[in-house]
Image (cartoon, helix red, strand yellow):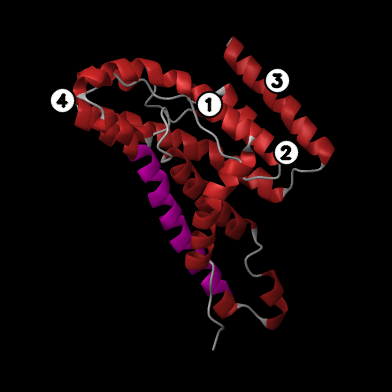
């Protein structure tokens, strides 16, 4: 096991132990974490697949077009930030290690970089809608077929909760990554409107802004809640609202 993976395991275990000690981990929190990892992995894979389709095979050559989550997990974004947000009583949002992209290898670097950047959150948002549709169909079927004794437990099964939490996690990942602040994916919109002469220089500078994103997520998690709440309420209203059975 590499040093980075040991660090990931130790920090994760310590923070989960702290969350358990404080009594802030419940079934919902565990489901969030269970669906967060495959969601961020798929997010990063979509970047790599898009880059490959547009001419850059860097991610493929580096072995990052893999479904193995250990190739993608980031100690800060995949463990530290999500667990701190759980301890703060907020939905855990995180990220995986970015797949390596060499924009110079894209057939049309500036337009290609924009597409590669936006395909990640687009993937999460499409999944959020698809999971919402499935969750609505499953719970609506339960409502139609449940007996009077079963009515109070509708929507509480593990499958129902897993679908709902997976939909919400992907929704929040998509919204979070569309914030127009580099190095988040939404920053690719800002990068596209920069003058061509400033673009490559900005690409070298933008990774330093990651510290700003981490500080906001860790020190001011309520700011993220203000951003997320309207979208979360919309998703719940769209997919978890049911008319009374006739």
Sequence order check, earlier mark of 3 and 1: 3
**Which residue in the rendered view is the most extreme toward the left?**
107
What is the distance, in whole Å, between disc 3 and disc 4 at their CAs? 42 Å
Element class at badge 4: loop
Name the residue that disc number 4 marks. 107
The x and y percentages for residue 84 are 68, 34
Which of the two marks, 1 or 4, is nearer to us in this view? 1
The crowd level at tag 2 (other Cα within 10 Å; few <14, some 14-19, many 20+) is: many
What is the distance, in whole Å, between disc 1 and disc 2 at their CAs? 20 Å
Position of the N terminus by quadrant: top right
Name the residue that disc number 1 marks. 212
Which disc number belongs to residue 10? 3
What is the distance, in whole Å, between disc 3 and disc 1 at their CAs? 24 Å
**Residue 123, above or below 95:** below
Q: Is residue 86 magenta?
A: no
Residue 61's image quarter? top left
Comparing 234 with 101, the one in front is 234
Count of marks placed on residues: 4
Element class at badge 3: helix
Q: Are marks 1 and 2 in contact (CB under 8 Å)?
A: no
Comparing 137 with 224, the one in front is 224
What is the distance, in whole Å, between disc 2 and disc 4 at their CAs? 45 Å
Sequence order check, earlier mark of 2 and 3: 3
What is the distance, in whole Å, between disc 2 and disc 3 at their CAs? 17 Å
What's drawn in magenta, residue-wise?
Answer: 119-142
Which of the two marks, 3 or 4, is nearer to us in this view? 4
The x and y percentages for residue 121 are 39, 41
Q: Residue at x 33, y 38 (%)?
A: 118
Residue 186's image quarter? top left
Sequence order check, earlier mark of 2 and 4: 2
Name the residue that disc number 2 marks. 87
Q: Is residue 132 magenta?
A: yes
């Amino acid at each position: 096991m590499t040093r980075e993976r040991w660090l990931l395991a130790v920090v994760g275990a310590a923070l989960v132990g702290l969350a358990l000690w404080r009594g802030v981990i419940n079934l919902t929190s565990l489901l969030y974490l269970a669906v967060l990892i495959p969601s961020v992995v798929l997010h990063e894979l979509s970047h790599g697949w898009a880059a490959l389709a547009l001419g850059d095979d860097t991610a493929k050559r580096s072995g990052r077009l893999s479904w193995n989550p250990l190739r993608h997990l980031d100690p800060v974004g995949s463990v530290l930030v999500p667990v701190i947000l759980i301890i703060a009583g907020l939905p855990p949002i995180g990220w995986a290690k970015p797949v390596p992209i060499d924009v110079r290898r894209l057939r049309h670097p500036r337009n290609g970089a924009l597409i590669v950047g936006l395909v990640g959150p687009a993937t999460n948002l499409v999944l959020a809608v698809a999971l919402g549709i499935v969750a609505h169909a499953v719970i609506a079927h339960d409502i139609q077929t449940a007996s009077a004794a079963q009515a109070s437990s509708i929507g509480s099964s593990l499958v129902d909760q897993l679908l709902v939490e997976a939909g919400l996690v992907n929704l929040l990942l998509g919204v979070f990554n569309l914030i127009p602040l580099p190095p988040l994916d939404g920053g690719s919109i800002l990068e596209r409107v920069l003058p061509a002469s400033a673009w490559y220089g900005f690409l070298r500078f933008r990774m330093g802004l990651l510290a700003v994103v981490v500080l906001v997520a860790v020190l001011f998690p309520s700011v993220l809640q203000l951003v997320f709440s309207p979208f979360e309420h919309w998703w719940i209203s769209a997919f978890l609202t049911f008319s009374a059975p006739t």
